[in-house]
Each structure stands twice: as structure tokens, then as C-alpha cells.
Image (cartoon, helix red, strand yellow):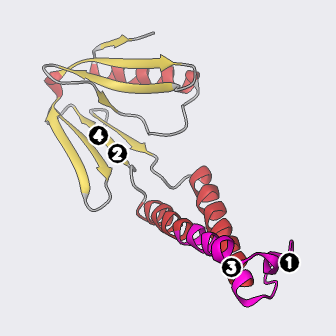
Amino acid sequence: MSAAVLEQSVLGSRRLSNLLVAAAVSVGGVGFLLASLSSYLGQDLLPFGHPAALIFVPQGLVMGLYSIAAALLASYLWYVIAVDVGSGSNRFDKESGVVVISRRGFRRPVCVEFPLKDVKAVKVEVRDGFNARRRVSLRLQGRRDLPLTRVGEPLPLAQLEQEGAELARFLGVNLEGL
């Protein structure tokens, strides 16, 4: 990379927390399925508890429905992780005067391209509380702010400030929000 190009990679849905949630939902779904089959067959298929003692209608049937719901949710979660939805890059090119923001979507990539001269400022937004938000975004002329950071776990404050300051310095625009 030259000094006139800055490229930032963005982490998508392939994170440890998402892997753990998908694994937990999968294991829970298998547990519900085994509990439902145990109540239907009258044999304990799980090493703990006594699901064979459950009456199949309605308890075992409901357990089976829970296992179907868990299988659907787990399939969705594993698909999102496999595709790595949300990953991509932010590319700022001073030579060609273009900003390219690209992300992986569910079915196709999403790519936003606009002139570098439309960037008015780099905005750092920090909101703590129940619905915490920590993000770096571009303030664009005539458009809404364009977020640049990943969705999900909030970034540490020091890293957020450093990324915002580095980008503002590179683009030669103001840093807002601190």
C-alpha cells in the first residue's frame, strides 16, 4: 500500500461469541430432539433426567417443536458464520479521489463508492448504557452518516479514538464527537 491509500479491514460475523451461540443453540436443539424421541419411544436417550417419563402429547410434542425451531435458528446462525456476513473493507484512495466501502451481504456483496471530496468529517460516537454504541462514521455532504466500524461488540474507547483520529488525519478532515 502506498501513502495515498488507506485500507481498513472490518470483522464480520465470524467471531468467537457467534460461534459459541450457534454451538449452544445446536446442542440445545439436539437435547430437545432427544427428549421428544425419549418420550415417544419410552426409553431414556439422554444421560441425565428421565425424559421417557414425559407424556408424548403434549410435552414430548412441544419438545419436538422446540427442536425444530432450534434447528432452524442454528441453520441460520451457521450460514451467517460460514458466509461471514458483515465482513469487508474500507478503502480510502487519495490518488483516485474515491472512497469504497464494501461488505459481504447474505446473498451478494454490498459496495458503496463515492468521491473523497464528499467527506466533511470523521465522527466518533460513544453512547453508553443499555443500548451502548461505539462507532466511527463518515459525515458526508448531503447524505446520512456512513458507519465504518463493525456491528456487535463495542470497541474499546482507546481503540475507537485512535481509529477515528488516524482516519481524520489521513483524510485531512475534522474529528467530531470527542
User: In the rendered view, would you say 67 is above or below 174?
Assistant: below
On screen, 173 above or below 42?
Answer: above
Disc 4 residue type (three-letter): Arg
Residue 59 included in the magenta stretch of the image: yes
Residue density around tag 2, few if under 14, some if 14–19, many if 20 or more, within 10 Å? some
Label drawn at residue 56:
3
Question: Which residue lies under the disc numbered 4?
Answer: 91
Specify whether 152 is left or right of 9.
Answer: right
Three-letter amino acid code at the position of disc 2: Ser
Instruction: Find out whether the residues at labels 4 and 3 contact each other: C-beta distance under 8 Å.
Output: no
Q: Name the residue under label 1.
A: 47
Which secondary structure is most common in the magenta stretch? helix
Residue 89 numbered mark, or none: 2
Q: Which of marks 3 and 1 is nearer the N terminus?
A: 1
Q: In which quarter of the image is residue 50?
A: bottom right
Determine whether the residue tagged by mark 4 lies in a helix, strand or loop: strand
Q: Nearer the viewer, mark 4 or mark 1?
A: 1
The disc label shown at residue 134, or none: none
Q: Could you tell me if the residues under marks 4 and 2 are in contact, i.e. CB atoms within 8 Å?
A: yes
* C-alpha distance separating marks 4 and 1: 53 Å
Cα separation between marks 3 and 2:
52 Å
Part of the protein shown in magenta: 39-68
| Camera-nearest label, 3 or 1 | 3
Kindly report the distance in space between the C-alpha atoms of the residues bearing marks 4 and 2: 6 Å
Which quadrant: the N terminus?
top left
Identified by mark 1, the residue type is: Pro
